[in-house]
């Protein structure tokens, strides 16, 4: 698969707006010929009818690449373990050839300066469905944790991204809890507190299992469903932990 075919064949709404500009600049810095070919496909989507622009796998992919580059640079350095995590995840999701194309684009994006986190996130918020935005957030925490610890700078950056993406505090706290060790994490994952009754826990589990079900991102393809399955298992583990602790 050629680079131009990969980047041009799987994108929808992300060919326009600030994300499209970032992609175009990245491609242009890599291969001028490819940039000339793909720029012909750039358009500015009519966001007044954004429901007609369904998020495709490629839209999710380039959104993830840009946000990942922002998070990786949050603490002022690019840790090799974080870069390796990004590469490994893309190989796992897409296979080696497509992952190599994606990672090459990712590295050129990380070299760009003055990327507007707000503008990128507002485009994603406007055009991407809620379950897919939650999946983006989950992956970003995975990157931050790849070197063994989520630094304060990284957490602050992800929190900022979550706000711009329109992710609620409850959803943010739930996903964040999946990457920290705490006696209260099981409650946080299920978006409840320790005062919850057993019936409250059961109800919360059903709600979260529905929210994080892999079928919610089925439109992104099997690659991203696998990532959603990992998040779904975190909900199941939290519920099973509370079952064991409380004996119900």
Image (cartoon, rainbow, N blue to C red):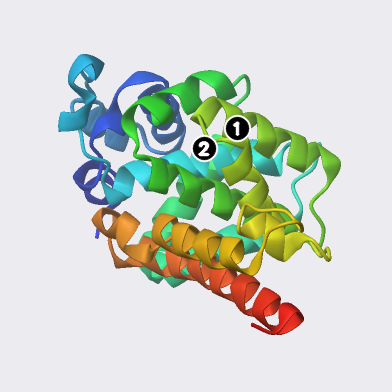
Where does the image place residue 162, in percent across and percent down from the top left?
59, 35
Identify the residue at horizontal 30%, vertical 51% (top origin). 57
**Is residue 170 shown left or right of residue 225?**
right
Answer with left or right where residue 185 lies relative to residue 47. right
Does dot 2 land on a helix, a strand or a loop?
A: helix
Q: SS for tag 1?
A: helix
Name the residue at 52% across, 37% down: 66
Residue closest to the eye, 69 or 30: 69
Residue under numbered circle 2: 66
Q: Which residue is mark 1?
A: 161
Image spot of residue 84 (x, y percent): 64, 63
- Residue 75 in view (yes/no): no
Query: Can residue 219 be seen at all in this image of the molecule?
Result: yes
Query: Looking at the image, is mark 1 or mark 2 earlier in the sequence?
Result: 2
Q: Is residue 95 left or right of residue 140?
A: left
* Image quadrant in which you'd find residue 235: bottom right
Out of 70 and 244, give the one closest to the viewer.
Answer: 244
Find residue 23 and report its image quarter.
top left
Quadrant of the rendering where the C terminus is positioned: bottom right
Position of the N terminus, as image quadrant, is: bottom left
Establish if 46 lies above or below 25.
above
Q: Are marks 1 and 2 in contact (CB under 8 Å)?
A: no
Q: Quadrant of residue 139?
A: bottom right
Alpha-carbon span between mark 1 and mark 2:
11 Å
**Where in the figure is residue 54, as x and y percent of width and height?**
21, 39
Of residues 197 and 189, the one drawn nearer to the viewer in this rendering:
197
In this rendering, the label closer to the viewer, 1 or 2:
1
Taking the spot 42% from the left edge, 55% from the top edge, the residue there is 211
Other residues around mark 2 within 10 Å, as few (<14) / some (14–19) / many (≥20): many
Question: Could you say which disc has been placed on residue 59 in the image?
Answer: none
Instruction: Sort mark 1 into few (<14), some (14-19) or many (20+) by Cα contacts within 10 Å.
Output: many
Q: Is residue 148 above or below residue 128?
A: below
């Amino acid at each position: 698969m050629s680079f131009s075919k990969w980047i041009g064949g799987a994108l929808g709404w992300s060919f326009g707006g600030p994300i499209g500009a970032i992609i175009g600049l990245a491609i242009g810095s890599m291969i001028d010929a490819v940039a000339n070919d793909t720029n012909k496909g750039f358009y500015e989507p009519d966001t007044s009818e954004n429901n007609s622009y369904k998020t495709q796998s490629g839209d999710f992919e380039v959104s993830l690449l840009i946000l990942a580059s922002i998070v990786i640079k949050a603490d002022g350095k690019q840790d090799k373990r974080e870069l390796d995590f990004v590469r490994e995840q893309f190989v796992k999701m897409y296979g080696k050839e497509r992952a190599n194309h994606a990672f090459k684009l990712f590295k050129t994006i990380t070299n760009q300066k003055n990327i507007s986190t707000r503008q990128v996130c507002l485009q994603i918020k406007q055009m991407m469905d809620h379950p897919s935005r939650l999946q983006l957030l989950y992956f970003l925490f995975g990157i931050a944790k790849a070197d063994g610890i989520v630094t304060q700078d990284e957490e602050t950056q992800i929190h900022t991204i979550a706000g711009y993406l329109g992710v609620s505090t409850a959803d943010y706290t739930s996903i964040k809890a999946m990457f920290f060790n705490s006696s209260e994490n099981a409650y946080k994952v299920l978006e409840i507190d320790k005062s919850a009754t057993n019936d409250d826990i059961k109800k919360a589990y059903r709600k979260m299992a529905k929210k994080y079900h892999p079928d919610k991102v089925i439109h992104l393809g099997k690659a991203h469903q696998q990532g959603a399955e990992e998040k779904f298992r975190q909900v199941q583990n939290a519920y099973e932990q509370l079952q064991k602790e409380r004996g119900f």
